[in-house]
Image: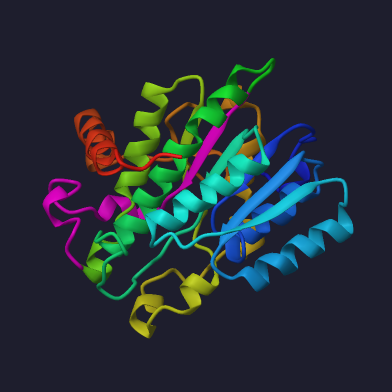
Amino acid sequence: MKFDSSQVPDLSDKVFLVTGGTGGIGKETILALAKHNPQGLYFTGRNSQRGAEIVADINASAPSITVAFLECDLESLESVKHAAEQFVSQSDRLDVLVCNAGVMNAPPTLTKEGYEVHFGVNHLAHALFIKLLLPTLLRAAELPNGDARIVSLTSQGYAMHPWGGILFNKLHVPQGASSLLYLANLLYAAELARRYPQITAVAIHPGVVSTELVKTQSFLARAMIPFSRLTPQQGAYNTLWASTSDKEKIVNGGFYEPVGVPGRKLRQSCDDKLAAQLWEWTEKELEGWHL
């Protein structure tokens, strides 16, 4: 499918929240959305100075848009909760939550709450965002012509998951690059669609993109990434498509490759029982976190 940011429709009255919006694909997503008249743009990141610069740039070119940076460290669930609290204190509406931020090939370590860092950041922190902002998304879905969405970035690398899919007994153990698995993002999107069909939830692969995340990898890790890479601007196209295109063209709970192409679900990405198990495990881990 041929697609670029010029095909994004008018976004009047729509409110977006993008995690990891201060660089790479997230930043390009924010800048592209800002050109189409959304009601509100909110984005998270750890670098408050960079966040302030992006807010200033958007305010200069589109002063009618409400745009705000929410400082957030996804290695801390407390920080996620604080960012969610900031959002709901500023907006009573959320139409699209883009779970964009992530880590790749980080050193073996744990998050502040003791979860393996890749799983803690790429899945659990976003699951908490979803849990805390779900009531706001559901209200948007109930509005006339309501169209609430959750777009989760993942990777074709999900197919490299270990035997058994998600090894729940190892999610509190530092594992390094071997734990770089995106299966949870696909399963969680599919389970969200089953449990909350009024919200469109999809997982998307942005393509192989030349971002700072890739540039900071080791020589060996970079050598394993295809040489032909998209620019961050091109890498945002699949996110923009999933966030703004006609929802009748999107299969709820689906997985899409660039741009808008149904991706193949291999191995345990089709395992509904594992998806339900992941949901229940996540709910149990997050049961003490509320706004």
Q: Residue at x 59, y 40 (%)?
A: 88
Lateral position of residue 76 relative to residue 269, left or right? right
Using the image as rendered, state which of residue 14 and residue 35 is in the foreground. 14
Lateral position of residue 216 relative to residue 260, left or right? left
Q: Is residue 72 magenta?
A: no
Lateral position of residue 67 relative to residue 174, left or right? right
Residue 44 placement: quadrant: bottom right
Tally of numbered tags: 0
Residue 221 placement: quadrant: bottom left
Q: Residue at x 62, y 54 (%)?
A: 43
The answer to whether 289 is drawn above or below residue 249 in the figure is: below
- Residue 259: image x %, image y %? 58, 44
Residue at the far bottom in the pictured view? 219
- Residue 214: image x %, image y %? 47, 72
- Residue 239: image x %, image y %? 58, 46
Lateral position of residue 190 relative to residue 4, left or right? left
Q: Is residue 167 magenta?
A: yes
Q: Is residue 234 visible?
A: yes
> Which region of the structure is painted magenta?
147-174
- Residue 185: image x %, image y %? 37, 45
Residue 1 placement: quadrant: top right
Q: Residue at x 41, y 70 (%)?
A: 225
Q: Is residue 242 visible?
A: no
Figure colour scheme: rainbow
The answer to whether 77 is drawn above or below residue 281 in the figure is: below
Using the image as rendered, state which of residue 107 and residue 74 is in the foreground. 74
The answer to whether 34 is drawn above or below residue 263 in the figure is: below
Q: Residue at x 30, y 56 (%)?
A: 119
